Image (tube, rainbow, N blue to C red):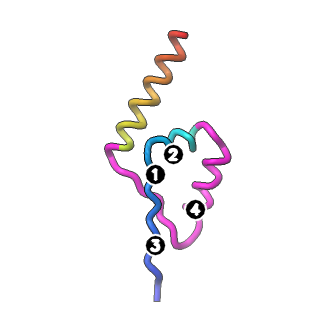
Amino acid sequence: MNQPRKLVFLDTDILISAYEDSRCKGILDHAANRDGFQLVTSITVLGETLFKAMWIVTWLKTS
């Protein structure tokens, strides 16, 4: 009988960390490839992540 997959919710800070830090991305990749875990997030988190990423890019351009 199949065990239910454990959901791992990714918030905005984790998504940004995974982009910026290869160690964090490696941990998420490992969890995603392991049977029994499913990485999930929400549309609002994706929107917030995009907003923060655009803010960072704008800040870097003006610095």
Crowd band around label 1 with a 10 angstrom C-alpha radius: few (<14), some (14–19), many (20+): some
Q: Residues within 10 Å of mark 2 (few under 14, many from 20)?
A: some
Considering only order in the chain, which callout, 4 or 3, is on the residue closer to the N terminus?
3
Label 4 or label 2, whichever comes before in sequence order: 2
Q: Residue 54 in the image: state x and y as whole percent.
A: 43, 25
Q: Which residue is outermost to the right?
A: 23
Give coordinates of residue 49: x percent, y percent: 42, 37
Looking at this view, name the residue that lies furthest to the left.
44
Look at the numbered disc 1 and give the secondary structure of its residue. Answer: loop
Q: Secondary structure at mark 2?
A: helix
- Farthest-out residue, top: 62
Q: Which residue is mark 4?
A: 31
Q: Give the mark nearer the N terminus: 4 vs 1.
A: 1
The answer for how far apart the CA atoms under marks 3 and 4 are is 11 Å
Give, as a three-letter code, the residue at label 1. Leu
Q: Position of residue 12 (x, y in %)?
A: 44, 42
Q: Residue at x 50, y 22 (%)?
A: 57
Can you say whether 34 is above or below 60 in the image?
below
Q: Residue at x 65, y 52 (%)?
A: 26
Are the two marked residues, 2 and 1, in contact with CB atoms closer than 8 angstroms? yes
Q: Is residue 29 magenta?
A: yes
Q: Amino acid at mark 4?
A: Ala
Disc 4/disc 2 C-alpha distance (Å)? 13 Å
Q: Which residue is mark 3?
A: 5
Identity, as a three-letter code, of the amino acid under mark 3: Arg
Q: Disc 4 vs disc 2: which is toward the camera?
A: 2
Q: Which residues are magenta?
A: 20-44
Q: Amino acid at mark 2?
A: Ile
Q: Between marks 3 and 2, how big is the CA–CA gap?
A: 20 Å
- What residue sits right under mark 2 in the picture? 14
Q: Which residue is mark 1?
A: 10
